[in-house]
Amino acid sequence: MADVLVSAAFAFISIFVFFSTGRFPELNINDPGPALFPKMLSVILLVLSVALLLSAVFKRRKAVFFEHGWKKVLFTVLLLLLYYFSLDILGFLVSTSLFLIILIRYLEKRNLLHDVAISVGFTFLIYSVFQLLLNVPLPEFGI
Amino acid sequence: MLSHLFYGLAKVLRPDIFLLLLLGVWGGIAIGSLPGLTATMGVALLLPVTFGMEPEAGMLLLLGIYIGAIYGGSVSAILLRTPGTPAAAATAMDGFEMAKRGEAGKALGISTTASFIGGIVSTLMLITISPILAKIALKFSAPEYFALAIFGLSIISSISGKSPLKGIIVGVFGLLVSTIGMDPMTSYPRFTFGNVNLLNGFSFIPVMIGLFGLAQALYNVEESEQAVKIQQKVEGVLSALSEIKRILGTAVRSAVMGTFIGIIPGAGADIAAFVSYNEAKRWSKHPEKFGTGIPEGIAAPEAGNNGVTGGAMIPLLTLGIPGDAVTAILLGALMIQGLQPGPLLFKEHGELVYTIFSGLLVGNVLMLISGLLGIRLFIKVLSVPKNILTPLIFVLCIVGSYAMNNSFFDVGVMLASGVIGYIFMKLDFPASPIILALILGPMAESNLRRSLIMSGGNYSIFFTRPISAFLLTLALITFITPFLKDFIKRKNLGN
C-alpha cells in the first residue's frame, strides 16, 4: 500500500514538472535551454513510478509503517516543529533547554533534577562552543 | 613529492592542528562505537564546528572523525554483536564469536590493528594514485565531466541493495530536486515558486544533516531502549599483536580492495567490509572456520572498511566527486571554505592536499595507539543512555543546519529532509542516491549543455571523444550489472 502511495506521489511530481517546463524560455539555438534536463528527468521518473506501482500491485507487502513506535516519532516531529518556531521567539538558550527537558522526560522518566541539569548544561555547552569559541552565531535571546 | 609530505607533516604536528586531529579520532571512535550513530552522522554534525577554522584544521578534525568512527563501529560489533556503524556489520560475525569465548580483548586488538593497516595502505594508495589522476583530469573538458557524472550516477543501481528500482527512483527524484533554483547557464529560475531562498537551489549540507542525522535519530526514538551492560571482560588487547603475521596478508589484500571500492562513487565502507569478508573466505584454505571467531574474519572486514577512507578521498580530491557519503560532506566542507575540489586543487592548493595526506597517516597512527591502549575507556561510552543521547542529536542537527548560513530556511530544509529520510528508511528507499544526485546533477546538466554548445547541438560529441566514450560505456555496464546478475540468478533457479 505504501509503495502505491509513494509511486502516485512521484508520478504526480513528474507530471507537474513536465508541464512546468513547457513555460521555460528557449534562448540559444545550440543550448537546449533550461527545460531539457528536467523534462527528460520527469519522463524517466514517470516511467519508473509506473514500474514501481506495477511491482507494488503484484507483490503485496504488509504495511510496515504503523509499528509500535510511530506515536513516539510523531510526537518528536511535532515537538521539533514547535522548537523550530520557538527559536525565533524565545532564542536559542530558552527554547533548546525546554525542548531537551520535554523530549528527555517524554522518552524516559528519570530523576527530574538530573534531566534538567543535563538539558541546561548541554544547551550552555553548545552555546559556548559555537557562539563564544567558534564564532558561529546562534539565534539571539528573544527574552 | 616527499618534500610536500614533510611540509604537510610539519603542519599536522602544529600543536593546535594535532590536538584537533586527536580529538577528531577520539570523538570518531566514540561516535562509531555507539549503535545508531554513524560515521556520516558524526561528520555531518561536526561540520558546522569547522566553519570558523582554517581549512587544514577543519579538514583534519573531520577526517579524524571519519577514520575513528569507521574503526569504532567494530567495538560494539565485537562486544554486543550490534554493529556501531553499518560498516561493522560484517565484523560482528567473527568478532562476537571470539568475544563469547572470553577473548574480547584480543578481538578488539585485531580489529584495531587491521583497521590501522587498512587506513595506512589506503592512504599510501591515495598519495600515489591521486596526483596521477589529477594530471589526467586536467585534460578533461565538458563532455568528459558529463560522462564522469553519468558514471557516478550509474552506481546507484548497485548501491541500492534489495530494490534497485527504488534506488533509481530516489536518484532521479534527487536529480529533479537538483534542478531547483537558477538554471546554471541562463539563470532562469526553475521551480522556485517565487521563493528567494530557493534561487540558489537547496544547499546539500542541510539535506545531508537531515537525511543522515535527523532521520537516524527519529529511527532511534522509535527503537529507544534501555542502556546496555557490557558483560565481557576486556583484557589482553595487546595479545593481538602476536597474530599480526597471521592476519597481515588478509588485511593488506582487504585494504587494497577497500581502497578500490572507496574510489567508486557511492560505494562505501559497508559494502567494502562485506566484499572483503567474502573474498577472505573464498581465498582461505579453511573457509568453513569463518563465522566461528577466527582472526581473519575480523581482520578482513575491518581492513576493508578502513581501506575505504583513503580510497573515497581519491575521486573527491582529483575530480571533485565524492567516493562515499562521508566524503560528500567533506566536499561541502571544502566548498564552504571557498575551495573547489578537483584537479586544480592540486595545482592551486597543493599544501592543503599534502596536509590532508599527512594528516591521514598521522590520524591512523593515533587511532592505532588509542585503540590498543585506551579501548577500555571508549567502551564506557556504550553505557550512555540512548534516551538522553538522541534528544541531544536533534539539537546538534538544528544548530548545524542553522550555523552554515544563519538561516532558518536551511533548518526547515533539514527538518523536511529528515522526515522524508525517515519515511524512506521505513519504506526501504535508500537515501544515499539523493546525495549523489544533488552533487552530480548540476555537474551533469551544465556539462551536458556546455558540450552541446561546443558541438553545435550534436550529441555525437560524447561518443567521438575517447575518454568520454569509455566512461559512458563503463557507466552503461555498471548500471545494468545488478539487473543482469538478478536475471542470471533467476534463470538458474528456474532450471
Image (cartoon, coloured by chain):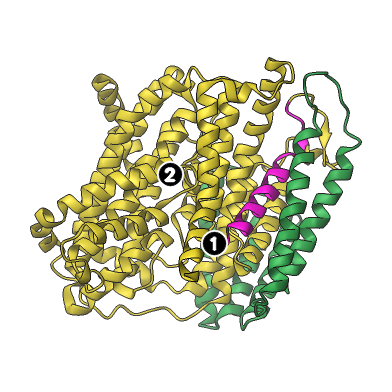
Chain colours: A green, B yellow
Q: Which mark is residue B393?
A: 1
Q: CA distance from mark 2 to mark 1?
A: 17 Å
Question: Could you tell whether B289 is left or right of A11 in the image?
Answer: left
Rendered residue at 23%/54% (across/down):
B114
Most frequent secondary structure within the magenta stretch: helix
Q: Position of residue B270 (x, y in %)?
A: 41, 57
Q: Chain of mark 1?
A: B
Question: Element under label 1?
Answer: helix
In this rendering, the answer to whether B5 lies above or below B412 is: above
The residue indicated by pointer 2 is B62
Q: SS of the residue at dot 2?
A: helix
Dot 2, crowdedness within 10 Å: few (<14), some or many (≥20)? many
Residue type at tag 2? Leu
Q: To which chain does the residue with label 2 belong? A: B
Circle 1 residues within 10 Å: few <14, some 14–19, many ≥20: many
Indicate the amino acid at tag 1: Ile
> In the picture provided, is B1 more to the left or to the right than A128?
left
Which range of residues does the magenta coloring cover? B163-184
Residue found 50% across the figure and 29% down from its top: B470
Check the image and report above or below for B475 versus A10: above
Q: Quadrant of residue A6?
A: bottom right
The question of residue B12 being in magenta is answered with no
Residue plotted at (68% across, 15% down): B454
Q: Quadrant of the N terminus of chain B?
A: top left
Is A57 above or below relative to B2? below
Q: Is residue B15 visible?
A: no
